[in-house]
Image (cartoon, rainbow, N blue to C red):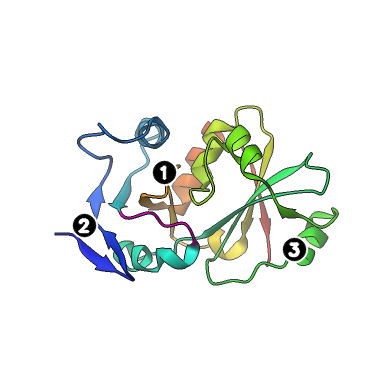
């Protein structure tokens, strides 16, 4: 039975991909295909659109995780792009991150670059988007707290479903498969 949490509808928790993927986007099903190919097990809930980290609190409780905040950033010249994973409750201070990376102040990248490099739209930003960055335009940054959690929560490139997987599986199986490395930062 589904329920409403924090004013959004959330399905029961399912293990693995949906039995019927008709009506689901190719972006979403491509995530399930890759996770299954890599033998990464995951739990899943479907839900109403969650355009912000604040709207994910019910999903957090349902999956028994803390969905991390995913920020798509760039330098002023829009030549260097970053995907930052950080705890949802932490404040983001661009000057602190820029200092650690030794670069000029970073800002939020635009939707066009997000679509071009990650193949996703605002509100659905996720580590899974790196599977679409076949030329390595986006550098992955992860806050140490995210790296040290047992489970990680993320969208399957759409913001109407959320997944829970072992953090080690995502960093040790998924990242090598999509030819990306991670830089650990402290925010």
Q: Is residue 49 magenta?
A: yes
**Could you tell me residue 106's position as x and y percent?**
77, 55
Distance (Cα) linking label 3 and label 2? 37 Å
Residue 187 placement: quadrant: bottom right
Which residue was labeled with disc 1?
Answer: 156
Looking at the rendering, in which quadrant would you find the N terminus? bottom left
Determine whether 30 is above or below 45 in the image. above
Which residue was labeled with disc 2?
Answer: 12
Can residue 175 be seen?
no
Q: Is residue 109 magenta?
A: no
Distance (Cα) linking label 2 and label 1? 17 Å
- Residue at figure coordinates x 79%, y 65% from the top left: 95
Distance (Cα) linking label 1 and label 3? 26 Å
Tags 2 and 1 in contact by the CB under 8 Å rule? no
- Left or right, 156 with respect to 23, comes to right
- Mark nearer the N terminus (2 vs 1): 2
Numbered label attached to residue 94: 3
Crowd tier of the residue under label 1, counting other residues whose Cα lies within 10 Å: few below 14, some 14–19, many 20 or above: many
Q: Which residues lie in the magenta part? A: 47-52
- Residue at figure coordinates x 79%, y 59% from the top left: 98
- Mark nearer the N terminus (1 vs 3): 3
**Could you tell me residue 78's position as x and y percent?**
78, 42
- Left or right, 11 with respect to 28, comes to left
């Amino acid at each position: 039975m589904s329920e409403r949490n924090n004013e959004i509808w959330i399905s029961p928790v399912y293990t693995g991909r949906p039995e019927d993927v008709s009506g689901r986007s190719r972006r979403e099903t491509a995530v399930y295909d890759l996770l299954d190919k890599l033998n990464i097990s995951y739990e899943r809930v479907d839900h109403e659109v969650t355009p912000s980290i604040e709207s994910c609190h019910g999903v957090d409780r349902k999956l028994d995780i803390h969905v991390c905040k995913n920020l798509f950033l760039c330098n002023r010249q829009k030549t260097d792009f970053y995907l930052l994973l950080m705890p949802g409750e932490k404040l983001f201070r661009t000057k602190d991150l820029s200092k650690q990376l030794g670069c000029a102040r970073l800002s939020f990248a635009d939707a066009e670059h997000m679509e071009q490099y990650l193949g996703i739209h605002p509100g659905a930003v996720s580590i899974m988007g790196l599977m679409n960055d076949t030329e390595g335009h986006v550098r992955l940054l992860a806050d140490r707290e995210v790296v040290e959690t047992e489970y990680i929560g993320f969208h399957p490139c759409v913001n109407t479903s959320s997944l829970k997987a072992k953090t080690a599986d995502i960093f040790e199986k998924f990242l090598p498969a999509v030819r990306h490395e991670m830089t650990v930062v402290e925010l």
